[in-house]
Amino acid sequence: MRILIVEDDQASMLVLSTYLTQFGAVSTAVDGEAGVEAFRKALTDGDPFQLVCLDIMMPKLDGQAALKQVRAIEKELNIPAAKQVKVIMTTALGDRENLLEALPQCDAYLQKPVDRAQLLFYIKRFGLLKS
């Protein structure tokens, strides 16, 4: 499995990387703009990510906007819903407004500090890991 972590906080990136490296190849991006760029490049190179962990509060392009761009790229490339990347929002924001904005387009929403068991629950639920 290929995993992209888009996170500007080094400690959070390290925690997620530590949780996820045992399950696949982890790439990282420090802001939403770099994350979208990495996502697009992986698709055009024919080696797409299966999972993206995406923070919301980031410089250059926030996670909400980055998520919209990721879904727009998939639509532009006619990627069927079943083959679209699974996106888990990993954020300190637990407010209703951010949750409601993200949920129509993301696959899960986890509030920081991210719980390893919850993260693995969703990855298994998405069919990215065997039980």
Image (cartoon, rainbow, N blue to C red):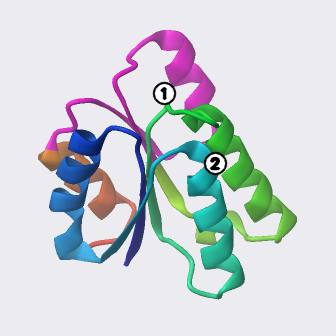
Within-10-Å neighbours for mark 2: few <14, some 14–19, many 20+: many
Label 1 packing within 10 angstroms: few (<14), some (14-19), many (20+): some
Q: Which residue is mark 1?
A: 57
In the displayed structure image, the side of residue 14 where residue 7 appears, left or right: right
User: Is-magenta flag for residue 34?
Assistant: no
The disc label shown at residue 33, or none: 2
Give the quadrant of the N terminus.
bottom left
Number of disc labels: 2
Pick the front one: 83 or 95: 95
Say left or right for 56 vs 92. right
- In the image, what residue occupies the spot 31% across and 52% down? 122
Residue stretch in magenta? 88-115
Secondary structure type for disc 1: loop
Q: Could you say which is closer to the camera, residue 130 or residue 59?
A: 59
**Where 46 sits versus 86, above or below?**
below
Residue 115, x across and y down, in percent: 16, 39
Q: Nearer the viewer, residue 22 or 109?
A: 22
Q: Is residue 40 left or right of residue 87?
A: right
**Residue at horizontal 82 percent and vertical 70 percent from the top:** 78
Residue 89 image point, x, y percent: 44, 39
Q: Is residue 108 above or below residue 92?
A: below
**Which amino acid lies under the numbered mark 1 shown in the image of this protein?**
Met
Residue 33 position, x and y percent, is 64, 48
Which quadrant of the figure contains the C terminus? bottom left
Task: Report the amino acid beneath label 2.
Answer: Glu
Question: Of all residues shown, which one is farthest toward the bottom?
Answer: 46
